[in-house]
Image: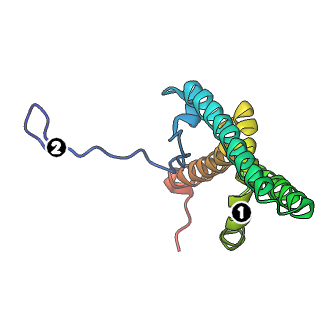
Amino acid sequence: MSDENGTNETPTAPAGPQPEELPLFGTTWLNHDGGYLWRRIGAGLGSLALAAAGAFVLRFAFEGLEIAKVGDFVNVLVIVAFSACSAIAFRRAWESYGKRTDPDTTQSAKGLMAIGFIGVLLAYFFRNLYEAPGEKLRRTEYETARTRYERRSSRRAGNPKKKRRG
């Protein structure tokens, strides 16, 4: 890239750790800028609308079971299975916003999370009322990394006479 004088200057990235991006929010969670509030409102309403649409689709599936006359036992079994999967998926999604999860555990629970997708969407909606889902976790990690970086930088930039010679 060249400026008006014809010199080539490349933009440099800021020193130190960079904030991790959140899906749908990018790095706007850091300073709550760039339409952060509107993104939160949109993401929350979108997840609630998707949860309602998912419940509507499940209702049609349940009516299909009634039309097929599979019996009360199967009807109750389907309701209990979807309710249990949604409750477990809600809890797992909610906890994942506050701490890093093991990738192997996440991979093994994908089926359960897919079946309990309504619980995941509701967890996203309710967490979005408080903050962007995962914001507190990312903010804590970022601030810890910045503090560590600044501590190391200040040690390096200290008085050269006090440095040990080895």
Q: How crowded is mark 2: few (under 14 residues within 10 Å), some or many (20 or more)?
A: few
Residue 1 badge? 2
Q: In what element is the residue under mark 1? A: loop
Query: What's the mark number on residue 101?
Result: 1
Q: Which residue lies at the image location 71% right of the left edge and 63% below the top edge?
A: 101
Q: How is the image coloured?
A: rainbow
Toward which corner of the image does residue 1 lie, by quadrant? top left
Mark found first going from the N terminus, 1 or 2: 2
x and y percent of residue 134 in the render? 67, 46
Q: Nearer the viewer, residue 29 or 64?
A: 64
Q: Is residue 98 visible?
A: no
The residue at the point 77 percent across, 57 percent down is: 65
* Circle 1 residues within 10 Å: few <14, some 14–19, many ≥20: few
What x and y, as percent, mark residue 98? 75, 50
Tell me residue 57's x, y (percent). Answer: 67, 46
Height in image: 31 above or below 14? Answer: above
